[in-house]
Each structure stands twice: as structure tokens, then as C-alpha cells.
């Protein structure tokens, strides 16, 4: 059974990296993230409900980072940088994360999704669902196992990742577009200081407002309160947060973990004592005035151990899409 799809961090600068290719035929270009082999448009003919054709805001893309062949495992992860649904922390929650994942043999696809104020829901949900489909449908091209595609998100990007992990479908077998024929369900979730709850005292108001607007309905708040949307089909999940996070309190991760436990979904949760919001890999960010945090630097290794225990990093014969 699969779920239905319903079609602040103000200091984060919005970083736009343009779309230089189309799904299946992307090419590297001047606007690609440094180190990316190509940038792929999620929709070759334009995103649904796009309000224009500006690459910076109207064209959702994936920047592709492939590991060296001698370390490649066949696993892949789509990365959703944070930014309160109004910007993208594209370096320390995007490019740096891709470099880490590549180092452990994981193909990485950094998602540039549509943002407020130009867009609100369901554009972001459409983008993350489509991103998983694009990677799965193009798996053979990138040397990816279509049964090992994870979704990783930070802060508001963590909310988007948790949305992708609770609001997905199996694809439409008779769709004209072959990408729409495959499942949008991620195989694993990795949520790092994620925004989760949309109708509690722990809600990140900036993300809530940018995603849902000024006066969202109760139904919309519930739909995007992803701790309430967990089912046994939600993917196994790794969560990392800090106890000191005042921007997005750790209750967000705790509530999602409780939902996972109730649904009997495998999970691993780490709440570190010290550390501000927005730490990325824990190595800090000069751009955002975030100091390194040695304790939080351990979460990527803990996550790697978890992924290995899940069999996600095993080198094996690739499945057919």
C-alpha cells in the first residue's frame, strides 16, 4: 500500500544554480554546482504550474555528483538543502553533503526545488516526488540501483524529505511520460534537524508560512504535519538533531520518531547536547557564521554505520527499474 499524493532561516541566502539540461540528457554548465557532472531539469518541458521560465526560480533541477567507480556502491541519495522554504543553503547542506556521500560510494543528486514567495505547496511536494522518479527511471544511466534511493534533508529541506517519505505513490503505469510510471517512494530517509510539525508549539513559523501561506486550513496543516502521516510504508529513517536548537526544536525529530515507532518503522535517532541550528555536517559555515561543532561532526559516520547495517551500501548486482 502506498500513500496518496496531494497534488526561519532568514539568514540563509537563496542560491540559484541553473538548469542546463533535461531529464535524461543533462549536461554540465556554468551554473552547475562546482564538482557536479551535470544538471538535470526535473521536467524537460517545464514544471507543472510553473509561473515562468526563469532558471533561478521556475525550473527545479538536480545537480548530479557521482562517486569514483572504485568506491561506487550503486546506492543513491537525493539531497534537499534547507532554507525555510525561502532559500537554499546550497553549500554546507548541499555540495559538502554530496562530497561526503560520494566518499562512501553513494551517487548524490542535490535538489533545487521551488521556493516562496513565488511558489507555495504543492509545488515543493511535486518537485521532491519527481526527483525520486527521475533518479529511479534513469538509474541505469547513473549506475544506480533503483531499489536503493534515499532522501536526505536539512531543516525545511528535512520537512520536504519527510513529506516525500510520507506522501508518495507507485507511479502511473499508463503514463505518457516514462518518468511518471515509476514509484516516488524513497527507500531510506535521513532527516537532519528537520522541520516536521506544522501545528504544534514547536512549529517553525517561517517554514510554515512560506510553504502554506498566511492562513492555512486545518486540513492542510494536518496534511503537512508529517509526524501524523507516518505509516508502516514510511521508509526506515535516521534522524539527527541538537538539544540546543532553538530555531527548530528537537521535538520535531522526537515527534517523527514516535510516529515511526508507532508504525513499527525501523529508525535511529541521535539528539546531541550542544549545537545551534543549521550545522550541516558539523564542520561549520563561514558564510552563515556557524562555528564547527566537533560532536555534531559524528552524525555522518553514525549515519554511514546505520546505512551499512541496513544493507544500503552493499555492492550488489543492480536491479532492473
Image (tube, rainbow, N blue to C red):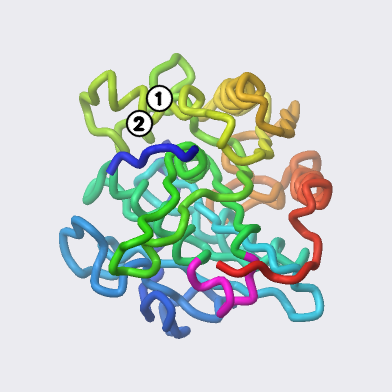
Residue on which disc 1 sits = 198
Q: Quadrant of residue 243?
A: top right
Residue 272 appears left or right of 182: right
Q: Going 55% across and 36% down the picture, which residue do you hit? A: 194
What x and y, as percent, mark residue 128? 42, 52
The residue pinned by badge 2 equals 208
Please tell me whether residue 139 belongs to the stretch shown in magenta: yes
Determine whether 180 is above or below 139 in the image. above
**Label 2: how many residues lie within 10 Å, few (<14), some (14-19) or many (20+)?**
many
As measured in the structure, the alpha-carbon distance from the residue carrying label 1 to the one carrying label 2 is 6 Å
Mark 1 or mark 2, which has the lower sequence index? Answer: 1
Which element is circle 2 on?
A: helix
> Can you tell which quarter of the image residue 46 is in?
bottom left
Furthest residue toward front: 174
Residue 51: quarter of image:
bottom left
The magenta segment: 137-145
Label pair 1/2, CB-CB below 8 angstroms: yes
Residue at image point 33% right, 24% down:
221
- Categorize mark 1 by other alpha carbons within 10 Å: few (<14), some (14-19), many (20+): many
- The x, y position of residue 102, in whole percent, is 70, 68
Residue drawn at x 35%, y 31% is 208
Q: How far from the left and from the top, in percent, is residue 232?
A: 59, 31
Amino acid at each position: 500500500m502506498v500513500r496518496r499524493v496531494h497534488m526561519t532561516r532568514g539568514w540563509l541566502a537563496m542560491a540559484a544554480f541553473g538548469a542546463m539540461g533535461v531529464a535524461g540528457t543533462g549536461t554540465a554548465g556554468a551554473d552547475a554546482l562546482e564538482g557536479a557532472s551535470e544538471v538535470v531539469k526535473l521536467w524537460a518541458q517545464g514544471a507543472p504550474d510553473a509561473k515562468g521560465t526563469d532558471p533561478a526560480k521556475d525550473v527545479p533541477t538536480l545537480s548530479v555528483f557521482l562517486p569514483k567507480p572504485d568506491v561506487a556502491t550503486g546506492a543513491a541519495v537525493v539531497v534537499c538543502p534547507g532554507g525555510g522554504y525561502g532559500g537554499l543553503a546550497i553549500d554546507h547542506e548541499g555540495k559538502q553533503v554530496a562530497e561526503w556521500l560520494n566518499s562512501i560510494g553513494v551517487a548524490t543528486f542535490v535538489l533545487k526545488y521551488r521556493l516562496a514567495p513565488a511558489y507555495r505547496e504543492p509545488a515543493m511536494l511535486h518537485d521532491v516526488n519527481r526527483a525520486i522518479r527521475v533518479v529511479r527511471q534513469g538509474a541505469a544511466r547513473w549506475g544506480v540501483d533503483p531499489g536503493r534511493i534515499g532522501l536526505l534533508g536539512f531543516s525545511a529541506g528535512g520537512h520536504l524529505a519527510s513529506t516525500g517519505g510520507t506522501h508518495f505513490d507507485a507511479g502511473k503505469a499508463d503514463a505518457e511520460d516514462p518518468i511518471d510510471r515509476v514509484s516516488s517512494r524513497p527507500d531510506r530517509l535521513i532527516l537532519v534537524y528537520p522541520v516536521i510539525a506544522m501545528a504544534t508549539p514547536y512549529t517553525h513559523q517561517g517554514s510554515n508560512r512560506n510553504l502554506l501561506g498566511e492562513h492555512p486550513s486545518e486540513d492542510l496543516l494536518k496534511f503537512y504535519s508529517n509526524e501524523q502521516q507516518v505509516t508502516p510504508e514510511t521508509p526506515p529513517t535516521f534522524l539527527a538533531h541538537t538539544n540546543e536548537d532553538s530555531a527548530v526544536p528537537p521535538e520535531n525529530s522526537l515527534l517523527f520518531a514516535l510516529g515511526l515507532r508507532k508504525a513499527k518503522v525501523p529508525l535511529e535517532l541521535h539528539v546531541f547536547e550542544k549545537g545551534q541550528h543549521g550545522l550541516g555536517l558539523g564542520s561549520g559555515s563561514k558564510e552563515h557564521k556557524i562555528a564547527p561543532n566537533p560532536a555534531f561532526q559524528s552524525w555522518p559516520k553514525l549515519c554511514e554505520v546505520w546505512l551499512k547495517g541496513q544493507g544500503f551500501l552493499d555492492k550488489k548486482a543492480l536491479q532492473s527499474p
